[in-house]
Amino acid sequence: MTKISQNSVAQCFTREMADEQYNPTLWTPRLPIEELLPKHIEFTNQNSDRYRATVSDGLSQRIFGEGEFSGAIDIYRTQNVAQDAPMVVYIHGGWWQWFSKEQFGFIAEPFNQHGFAVYMPGYRMAQDWSNDAPMESILKQMQLAVAEILNLAVEKRAPAVYLVGHSAGGHLVSMLHKTDWSEFSVTQEAQQKLKDVFSIAGLFDIRPLVNSFVNDSINMSSLAAEKVSPLLSGFPSNQTLSHLHLIVPEFDTPEFFRQTKEYHAKVIENQQKCSIFLASRCDHLDVIENLLDENNDVLAYLLKHMNA
């Protein structure tokens, strides 16, 4: 009897099944479904506006890239953060088509408090690209942003750069994790600055999203989805990559769990260091909201590995 892989099963999802399995708001017991996303938007906007106003003197911006790939990086460096402090790069989620870096400025607060400079690059939304490869373009734009930050880390004499991404950002940092930085004019010294990479509630096989609500505005093909799937892209040969951490919320969907376990096995199979951390009592959205709690388990996990 022929064994059907979990990947094949996912590819055979109906539109209704894919919409259910890849919509995390349907799976949390925390709030009624209709309230979850509006409450998240309210929380992130209010706390980001508050923090940005509080640290206005410690907030600056850096431009990167050229043409369509140009963008801006918001830099949060409060008075207690040294010029040569380690750097945290945060990439926001929103299915590559919603939200902005400004909306998640609150994420910088706990890291600033612990002495890290925080860099938040923004990316052009998938539906706003003028070409037919928006997902690949977003990835390239983030590669250019992180290349800029890695080279800046040498200039600042920062000891380390850590990548953190949530949801769509979790997917992007997983692709950045295996990027060949020499293709982006990143020096060897700068490449060595990249330390641990943290994918929070990320996805690693984008193909099942082609037949889902996520793709209604993006219009990516199955081939395009393959090209930006960490599970399907190769690993650099004879190179030890940074430690990859896959953080999955307890109340995320079965498909998020399946993909996380499958990608963990793939990374280990390629002799790279990879860990899974279960964010207990968290769903897809409050897993990052809760980072404002000094006693939060996910924050403790991040800081533990950033201070190792």
Image: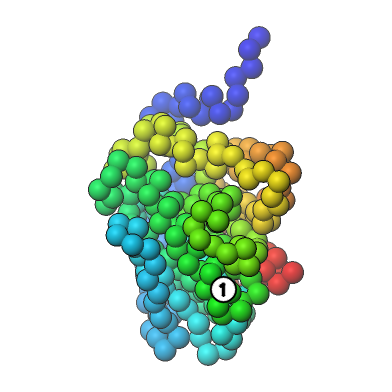
Residue 140 in the image, given as x and y percentages of width and height: 43, 52
Q: Is residue 63 visible?
A: yes
Quarter occupied by the C terminus: bottom right
Mark 1 lies on a secondary structure that is helix
- Residue 228 percent across, percent down from the top left: 47, 42
| Residue 17, image quadrant | top left
Residue at position x 46%, y 38% in the image: 227
**3 versus 250 height, above or below:** above
Looking at the rendered structure, the kind of residue marked 1 is: Ala
Vertical placement of residue 116 versus 34, above or below? below
Residue nearest the viewer, comparing 209 with 50:
209
- The mark tally for this picture is 1
Image: 219 above or below 121: above
Residue nearest the observer in this picture, 22 or 152: 152
Residue 51 locus on image (x, y percent)? 43, 80
Report whether residue 44 is seen: no
**Residue at the spot 52% in from the left edge and 45% down from the top edge:** 203
Q: How is the image coloured?
A: rainbow
For label 1, the residue is 153
> At 56% across and 51% down in the image, what residue appears?
180
Badge 1: residue crowd in 10 Å (few <14, some 14–19, many ≥20): many
